[in-house]
Structures are given as structure tokens and as C-alpha cells.
Amino acid sequence: MSLSYPLSKIAIEQLKIKVIDALKSVYDPEIRVNIYDLGLIYTIAIDPQGSARLEMTLTTPNCPVAETLPSTVNNAVAGVDGITDSAVELVWDPPWTTEKVSEAAKLELGIL
């Protein structure tokens, strides 16, 4: 898709779908489920200039990948064609629970 800025609402939604696909390629190394279906992504906002801002959490504050996973996520988002800039903020409120896990991931994890 050839992008010109500012993006229309439709182009932003199409770009958001591509970002979600990129997020589905990033896996929690301990649980082996992608971070999107695991419910770790709280917010995906893309502005008309193609700048993406994400809020994400981790399964626990003491998660061993707390130092590296946000930058891995940021790199995945930044690699999406059409994203001009990206930033990932790690948040703890609301806390992550298994309620946030998608149906498909629950089946994969055997918790459904």
C-alpha cells in the first residue's frame, strides 16, 4: 500500500491491522503464546502521520523479559510498512489477568 500523509481513517484502520499482525509474531518466551492473543497489548493508537503509540503490560511485574520485551515489540511495530514512528509504554494498571487472553490462546494453553 502506497501511503501519503495524513492518513484517512480507513488507512489508519488498515495500518492497525498490519500492526496487530506484527504483534502476533512476538511471543512471550515463557508462555509461548503471542503477546496480542495473550492480552498484553492494551492500546494501539496510530495518528494520521503514521506514528504508533502502544500501551502494553506483562504477565507479572517481575517478568524476566521486562527489560527486553517492550523494545522487541517496538521493533516489530516500527518494521510495519507505513509506520513512521513508534513508541511502547509499559503499564501496570490494570493488572494483567487470564481474563484478557483470547479464546484461541485459552484453547492453546488448555485453560478453556
Image (spheres, rainbow, N blue to C red):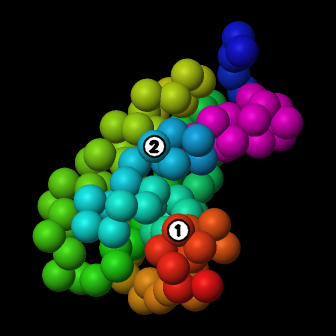
Q: x%, y% of residue 26?
A: 40, 48
Which residue is the extreme one toward the top?
2
Measuring 55% from the left and 63% from the top, which residue is drawn there? Answer: 37
Measuring 37% from the left and 54% from the top, which residue is drawn there? Answer: 27
Residue for badge 2: 25
Q: Is 93 inside the magenta-drawn segment?
A: no
Local SS, label 2: loop
Q: x%, y% of residue 78?
A: 42, 33
What amino acid is at disc 2?
Ser
Q: Quadrant of the C terminus?
A: bottom right
Relative to residue 95, is residue 1 drawn left or right?
Answer: right
Local SS, label 1: helix
Residue for badge 1: 108
Q: Main secondary structure of the magenta part?
A: helix
User: Eyeballing the image, is 111 above or below 103?
Assistant: below
- Counting residues from the start of the chain, the first of labels 2 and 1 encountered is 2
What amino acid is at disc 1?
Glu
Measuring 75% from the left and 35% from the top, which residue is drawn there? Answer: 14
Front-most of residues 5 and 73: 73
Task: Mark yes or no: residue 47 visible.
Answer: no
- Which mark is drawn over residue 33? none
| Residue segment shown in magenta | 7-19
Other-residue count near label 2 (Cα within 10 Å), few / some / many at <14 / 14–19 / ≥20: few
Q: x%, y% of residue 45?
A: 61, 53
Q: How many marks?
A: 2
Front-most of residues 10 and 48: 10
Measuring 59% from the left and 55% from the top, which residue is drawn there? Answer: 44
Q: Is 18 inside the magenta-drawn segment?
A: yes
Contact, mark 2 vs mark 1 (Cβ under 8 Å): no
Q: Which marked residue is nearer to the observer: mark 2 or mark 1?
A: 1
In the rendered image, which quarter is residue 82 located in?
top right
Disc 2 and disc 1: Cα gap in Å? Answer: 16 Å
